Image (spheres, helix red, strand yellow):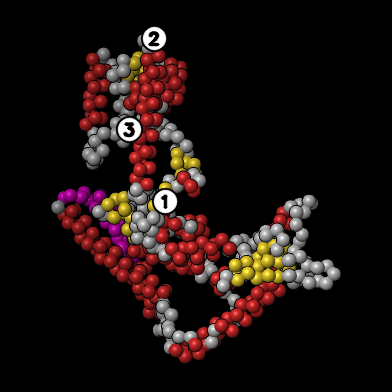
Amino acid sequence: MSKEDADRGNTESESIQNQKSLLVHYAVERGWDIYQIYCDEDYSGTDSLRPDFNRMIEAARAKKFQIVLCKSQSRFTRDMELVEKYIHGLFPIWGIRFIAVADNADTEVRGNKKARQINGLVNEWYLEDLSENIRAVFDLKRRQGQYIGSSPLYGYQRDPLDRHHLIPDPEAAEVVRQIFQWSLEGRGKQEIARVLNDRGIPNPTRYKAERDQFSGHPAADSRGLWNKTTVWRILHNEMYTGVMVQGRRKKASYKSKVLISLPEEQWFRVEGTHEAIVGRSLFEQVQRGLQLRSKTDGAGEAHLLSGLVKCMDCGSTMSKTTNCQPGRARVSYLRCKLYADSGKNKLCTRHSIRLDQLIELVSERIRHYVQNYYRLEELVLTPPPDTYRKALEREQSALTTQLEARSRALKSLYLDKVSGVLGLEQFAELNRDFLLEKSRLEQRLDQVGRELGASAKPPDRAVLADRARALLRLETIPRELVTALIEKIEIGEKDRETGRQEIRIIWKF
């Protein structure tokens, strides 16, 4: 149960060996038979889930022995609750005697209970102080912008020269950039997850399991599929802009594994600690788009003006409602959310307006401004950067580098087997993992090559001019353009007598 000699490799620590020797001699001197030696190395004394500890408890419950012998009470547990539960509660019922050699604790000795309870309290106070000291050290590292997570954020890897510094992982970083670009283009979280799955890109958990060669990790055998929650977390994570954000959650207490979320003002946020994968401007654009792309009906579809339309009187966001009558076309309306949510005692009026008519009105105003301010002959038409092709080329380069590294690793693995460093079973297991990973990389590299071969050549000036004319006609208004031009749209209450309704568009320019 000791945590000493942590750098010893797979050998048993000297501390554990000394404890075993002491206890075996103690038992032999008294003529006791040893039923079993229970040892949980590299586990904390507070951990009630220690495997050998729980095997010992089950054997005690089954009355397979009469004495539990430890070097000290803290080796049994440092948790006062477990002291009371077992040593003073269940052990006497099960007929188990508890002895801690170094503490002179023995449940058979009368008047010894207070000493055991004091030992338990001292051990618990020690743990509490130790926990506070460790937390203080971690908080200092967080304030300094040092990364103290157990594993790097997806898209990054640990710097070989400084384990508390993050550097981009080329392959995963490219996936993160693509996710942000797709979101900026208006793709939803579910659609982004579907495209990633269609391309055979493993999700962050599977990716980490494959890179760390965790053959026993549950994710190593999973399908490694993306979902909208994973995409949402990536899109909202400011760390991709080069800002270190830590301390979002903490343990309820040193004895508990339950994590509680902390308010944002208590987070540790340090600028410029690592290379950004996503630019600040792109990140903020995506955040604005995510805020506006709210679900407005049962299907979770966002309309063109979603989040922008406000009640002129109370300022509430207008919510969408759809009339579905048999034999009639579906007609959607916007109405004041405060009116819709306030029940019988209405706090505002309806302010209702047909959604399709409002969209057409706003679209016409946008077309008017665009066609009056921009002339095709005044535009400098240069082929747009093929971001998708560049992303594929970067991924192709990263995959080639990784395949070369895998090939070198396989050669090294074979040499270790020949020289006797690795046994046959170890070699077979590691070789299988390397070959599986190599096969996956080769398949993806082949797919990237096919996509690069199928990509069209850059359009010439005539083609660009045709595209520009189509865009300037704005037959379909893209949502990105709406959110870039319009701050909000205010809807007034319709006059019952005249039928007139005020609509005010507040532009950003």
Q: Residue 3, image x and y in percent?
A: 29, 34
Q: Which residue is mark 3?
A: 40
Q: Secondary structure at mark 3?
A: loop
- The answer to whether residue 73 is left or right of residue 186 is left
Q: Nearer the viewer, residue 274 or 86?
A: 274
Task: Point out the frontmost of discs 3 and 2.
Answer: 2
Q: Residue 59, image x and y in percent?
A: 39, 25
Q: Residue 141, image x and y in percent?
A: 34, 45
Q: Secondary structure at mark 2?
A: loop
Q: Quadrant of the C terminus?
A: bottom right
Q: Residue at x 37, y 30 (%)?
A: 129
Q: Which residue is mark 1?
A: 269
Q: Residue furthest left?
A: 419
- The answer to whether residue 185 is left or right of residue 216 is right
Q: Nearer the viewer, residue 241 or 105?
A: 241
Q: Is residue 347 magenta?
A: no
Does residue 322 appear in the picture of this structure?
A: no
Type of the residue with mark 2: Gly
Q: Nearer the viewer, residue 159 or 389?
A: 159
**Gap in Å between the C-alphas at discs 2 and 1?**
54 Å
Residue 471 lies in quadrant: bottom right
For marks 3 and 1, the one nearer the N-term is 3
Residue 68 lies in quadrant: top left
Q: Is residue 425 magenta?
A: yes
Q: Which residue is mark 2?
A: 111
For marks 2 and 1, the one nearer the N-term is 2
**Gap in Å between the C-alphas at discs 3 and 2?**
30 Å
Tell me, yes or no, whether the two marked residues, 2 and 1, touch with CB atoms within 8 Å. Answer: no
Type of the residue with mark 3: Asp
